[in-house]
Image (cartoon, rainbow, N blue to C red):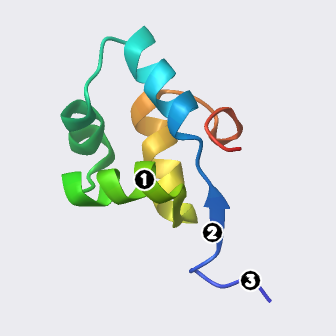
Amino acid sequence: MATSKSMLAVSAKKVQLIMAERCMNPYDVCSKAEISYPSYQRIIKTGNCKLSTLGKIAKALNVAVTEIIE
């Protein structure tokens, strides 16, 4: 049974490369994804986040979720 706390491994390297391609900084992503900067830092450091947050980040970067997971 799936829960809202399911996790997927986020690739920090992929996220950062996409940000560079789009001339974005972490604060831009946080603003567009409506997440806090400390949350962004934790996600990049650990590679873990909720599915809903993963979707928000992908949407902020204008990519499919599959493009930013391990």
Name the residue carrying label 3: 2
Instruction: Please provide percent x and percent y for residue 59.
Output: 47, 38
Name which quarter of the figure residue 22 lies in.
top left
Could you classify mark 1 by the number of other residues whose Cα lies within 10 Å: few (under 14), some (14-19), or many (20 or more)? few
- Residue type at the position of mark 2: Met
Q: Earlier in the sequence, mark 1 or mark 2?
A: 2
Name which quarter of the figure residue 23 lies in.
top left
Farthest residue toward the bottom? 1
CA–CA distance in space, label 1 to label 3 = 25 Å
Task: Name which residue lies at 26% across and 51% down.
Answer: 34
Q: Quadrant of the C terminus?
A: top right
- Residue type at the position of mark 1: Lys
Q: Is residue 22 left or right of residue 17?
A: left
As drawn, 17 above or below 6: above
Name which quarter of the figure residue 31 lies in.
top left
Q: Quadrant of the N terminus?
A: bottom right
As drawn, 42 above or below 29: below
- Residue type at the position of mark 3: Ala
Instruction: Please provide percent x and percent y for residue 40.
Output: 32, 51
